[in-house]
Image: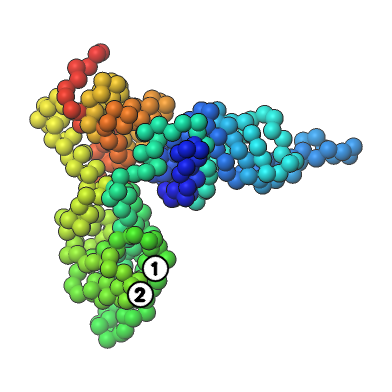
Amino acid sequence: MIVTEFNQKHGRCSLIIESAEDLWTLRRLISKGDVIVTRSSRVVKNEGEFTRPDKGERVKTTIALSVEEVHLDNSIERVRVRGSIVEASDESVTKTGSHSVTLTPGRALTINKDHWNPVEIGLVRPRRGLSRRFVIIAANRRDAGVGVLSGSHLSVIATVESGLGGKMSEEQSSGPYISKVVDLVSQTLREGDEVVVSGPGNFKNLIANRLKDALKSKTVQTVEGPDTTGADGVRALIKDPAFQRVARGSLLIEIQQLVAEVVKRVSTGDPKVAYSLPRVSEAAMAGAVDACAVSDDVFSAGLDEEEVVGTLNEVEKRGGSVYLADSSMEFGKQVSAFGGIVALLRYAVRPSG
């Protein structure tokens, strides 16, 4: 999530949504009574003697919407916000009735609040280091997978095929192939990103050197990861100790350590652990949660959205940390298996029921 402006004094935050993880942040940020400003469209009814009453023109406009309801649909990566129009840039847009907007990655919006509490401020100002992004290349002479790890979420961007094969591979120039990889990485890269190149043999060094020349960046490094390349190689590298040493201190490592500790405490009977929404919610209200992880597919278990969001906010309100786990990755699958939400506790909390 790119925060372009945050003015706490005037209660205003402008941002651009980048990923599905940002939608979770928005779901926790936007509350009833807030006013959001974004681009939308509205049907304007044409008036006239020969105009059909059920027809109208859809007008694109910038609207200010007073929030009444907000809902996260993580399965199709969107947040739906419904409310009443306070202001619109097009004078033909009526302010009567309710209106809904769909927030998806790529959308820019402004959130206006009467007061920003510490939890909300923390959501738009994440701890330094936890927001690190890695552009990952897993390559050999045949193919190269390129992916982006943002927070704890991995996206495979593309796989580039070299076209080199058989006995002629070594004799043919790999220059055009490497250029394609460099071009793709250049298009994907953002300021502050760290580039990690992996793969068998010395071919990864050729790519890394070309990237350093093209990007004029000191953030390109090679690691001796798994021999797998392409999209599978990108996914495999995330779990490899060589990459985890590079990513030490990042959100990925923190959440992996959290889930590993949860599994350890459950297996040893340590009472300072909670899983399932009722247990974690109870521990959160008691101020006992030190760190909590929620799976991005938590609602597939039929859990109440308001209760989940309220629990996460309560954890942070009382000094705990909250992490979102990518359910497509191993640690995310483990969180899903525990009911979609797990927590490490400061002290044991006896279940009330």
Applied colour scheme: rainbow
| Left or right: where 199 falls relative to 11 | left
Q: Confirm whether residue 111 shows in the render.
A: yes
> Which residue extends farthest right?
49
> Which residue extends farthest bottom?
171
Q: Nearer the viewer, residue 204 or 131?
A: 131
* C-alpha separation, residue under disc 1 versus residue under disc 2: 8 Å
Callout 1–callout 2 Cβ contact below 8 Å: yes
Percent from the top left, x then y, of residue 80?
52, 36
Q: Confirm whether residue 339 shows in the render.
A: no
Going by the numbered disc 1, the residue's amino acid type is Ser
> Which residue extends farthest front?
9
| Left or right: where 137 falls relative to 20 | left
Pointer 1 or 2: first along the chain = 1
Q: Quadrant of residue 41?
A: top right
Q: Nearer the viewer, residue 140 or 238?
A: 238
Q: Is residue 168 above or below residue 297?
A: below
Residue displayed at 20% across by 39% down: 258
Query: Which residue lies under the disc numbered 1?
Result: 186
Percent from the top left, x then y, of residue 326?
32, 44
Dot 2: within a 10 Å radius of its alpha carbon, few (fewer than 14), some, or many (20 or more) residues? few
Percent from the top left, x then y, of residue 33?
53, 28
Percent from the top left, x then y, of residue 243?
20, 57
Going by the numbered disc 2, the residue's amino acid type is Ala
Q: Is residue 302 above or below residue 14?
A: above
Query: Which residue lies under the disc numbered 2?
Result: 214
Residue displayed at 70% across by 30% down: 96
Q: Tag 1's secondary structure?
A: helix
- Labels in figure, total: 2
Q: Tag 2's secondary structure?
A: helix
